[in-house]
Image (cartoon, rainbow, N blue to C red):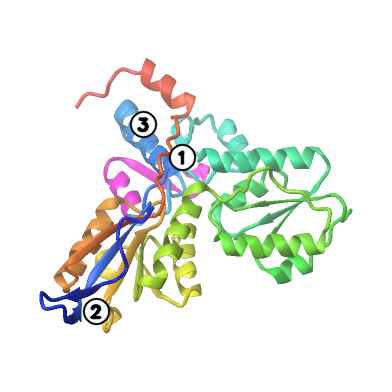
Amino acid sequence: MTTTIFDNTAISEGGNTTTKTKRVLLLKPRGFCAGVVRAIDIVQIALDTFGAPIYVRKEIVHNSYVVTDLAKKGAIFVNELDEVPEGARVIYSAHGVSPAVRERAKERGLKVVDATCPLVTKVHVEAIKFAKQGYSLVLVGHRDHEEVEGTQGEAPDVTQVVSTVQEVEALVVPDPNKVAYLTQTTLSLDEARYMIEALKRKFPNIVGPHAQDICYATENRQTAVKNVAHGADLVLVVGSRNSSNSNRLVEVSKNLDTNSYLIDTADAIQPEWLTGVDTVAVTAGASAPEVLVKDVVEYLQTMGYGSVDEVEVMPENVRFGLPPEIVQAIASAPPVAR
């Protein structure tokens, strides 16, 4: 439900139309999703419970502010497990890992805490199920993304990754009547729909998950942008360059012919972007903290955007529990001396 209107024409006491008021439409839901909150909490709790250093494979979430903040507190981010001392404690990022990574952790005697988002784990389980049932598996996503690498690793011999309709059309499988598809959780809804339609044309008997793989937060933030893009002159998306869902929000806006930019912080805003712009919509990717959104809004206010209206498109109240290994560790470990 929206809580504001799009008519930004000011009316004087005499009833005459005056100049438009420059304003900000602050989208809701925005920012942290349940999987990101859970992953960041896991690192923070591990630091509080075990003390620094805590190793994290890859960025815990794709946001430079979050990663820098946790690094200051004692988290050490590594690209691969071979960089972690044998027997040390390591956390898997929210994007998940392949079985090969899990096996390597066992070989090195690492104490593992798994911060994989439960919605990513759901896709991994689906991949395993389809592979065991003898399906060729098509994974729709961006092949250089960590989530896709982890999911593909569950059944690498039968999984092909596709990112374009052209790649779908070029697919070759052993049995065209025994094909299943899955998708990366952070694709745009429109992108996923086009790709699935292409797969169904190519393989009429293809099967897929019972419920879509695109996560609720990705869908909700894209829906919010779609709801306000027609009433805005510019959409600013707070998020890092390597954040898939943040990039998709920019694409959604541009596909609706509303100019949009991805910004890590308010410092990235170019004053010329605001030329002739009366209404700026502001949102944030699922890994971007609210403090960065606040900074953007404050900057826009200094640039004359005096009205700030929050627009709630739908409520969002999802919560995920902590993994059992961290719950057990909290219960058994003495507090760290401060």
Could you say which is closer to the camera, residue 100 or residue 148? Answer: 148
User: Residue 52's spot in the image, x, y percent?
Assistant: 31, 34
Q: Nearer the viewer, mark 2 or mark 1?
A: 2
Q: Which residue is mark 3?
A: 46
Could you say which is closer to the camera, residue 242 or residue 75? Answer: 242
Residue 271's disc is: 2
- Residue range corresponding to the magenta coloring: 65-83
Q: Nearer the viewer, mark 3 or mark 1?
A: 3
Considering the numbered disc 3 on the image, is that residue within a helix, a strand or a loop?
helix
Q: Identify residue type, mark 1.
A: Val
Give the Cα distance between marks 2 and 3.
Answer: 41 Å
Inspect the magenta stretch and tell me whether residue 74 lies in it.
yes
The answer to the question of whether label 3 and label 1 lie on touching residues, with beta carbons closer than 8 A, is no
Along the polypeptide, which appears first: circle 3 or circle 1? 3
Q: Which residue is mark 1?
A: 84
Quadrant occupied by the C terminus: top left
> Residue at image x 29%, y 64%?
25
Q: Where 270 falls versus 100 (above or below)? A: below
Q: Residues within 10 Å of mark 1 (few under 14, many from 20)?
A: many
Q: Residues within 10 Å of mark 2 (few under 14, many from 20)?
A: few
- The quarter holding residue 75 reads top left
Can residue 243 be seen? Answer: no
Considering the numbered disc 2 on the image, is that residue within a helix, a strand or a loop?
helix
Could you say which is closer to the camera, residue 56 or residue 17? Answer: 17
